[in-house]
Image (cartoon, rainbow, N blue to C red):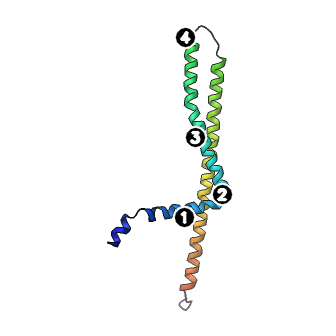
Amino acid sequence: KQRIYRTTDISSPFFTPIYRIFLLTLYNKYHLFIAIISVVLAAGFQLMIPGLLGHSVDQAIIVFETTSTNLEELYWTAFLLFSISVIRGVFAFIHTFFGEAIGQNIGYILRMQYFEHLQNWATKTNNYKDS
């Protein structure tokens, strides 16, 4: 019965590694803060793009249906759409860069803890008589 309970209990085994990883990310508080802010800003700019595309299509229909050749608004909308896409890309890059930096630092910390554990274990168990 205890074995069945261990295999069906999802709260303890699932949240323990996530909690440990979260604690390891707190070693890089500034990187984490920058990554979270940049992903929020990238998502905000990403949500602006469909509205601008719809607005530019509406402007293009008006320009091509009328005889007026007022393309200046359409050019400004295209420039704004391009600028927002570039800004979104920059924030997505920042998010990816700092996310990778946090991941590399976590890997480094885990490797150092593992090697320290191995070295301590080797000195405790080795009696140096066989070498």
Q: Residue at x 65, y 54 (%)?
A: 31
Amino acid carrying mark 3 in the image: Ala
Q: Pointer 4: what residue?
A: 65
Q: Which of 18 and 89 is in front in this view?
A: 18
Packing grade of label 4 (10 A; few <14, some 14-19, many >=20) is: few
Q: Pointer 2: what residue?
A: 29
Rendering coords of residue 112 (x, y %): 60, 69
Circle 3/circle 1 CB separation < 8 Å: no
Secondary structure under tag 1 reads: helix
The Cα atoms of the two marked residues, 3 and 1, are separated by 27 Å
Q: Pointer 3: what residue?
A: 43
The Cα atoms of the two marked residues, 1 and 2, are separated by 15 Å
Image quadrant occupied by the C terminus: bottom right
User: Relative to 74, does residue 26 appear above or below in the rendering?
Assistant: below
Closer to the chain start, of discs 3 and 1, is: 1
Closer to the chain start, of discs 4 and 2, is: 2
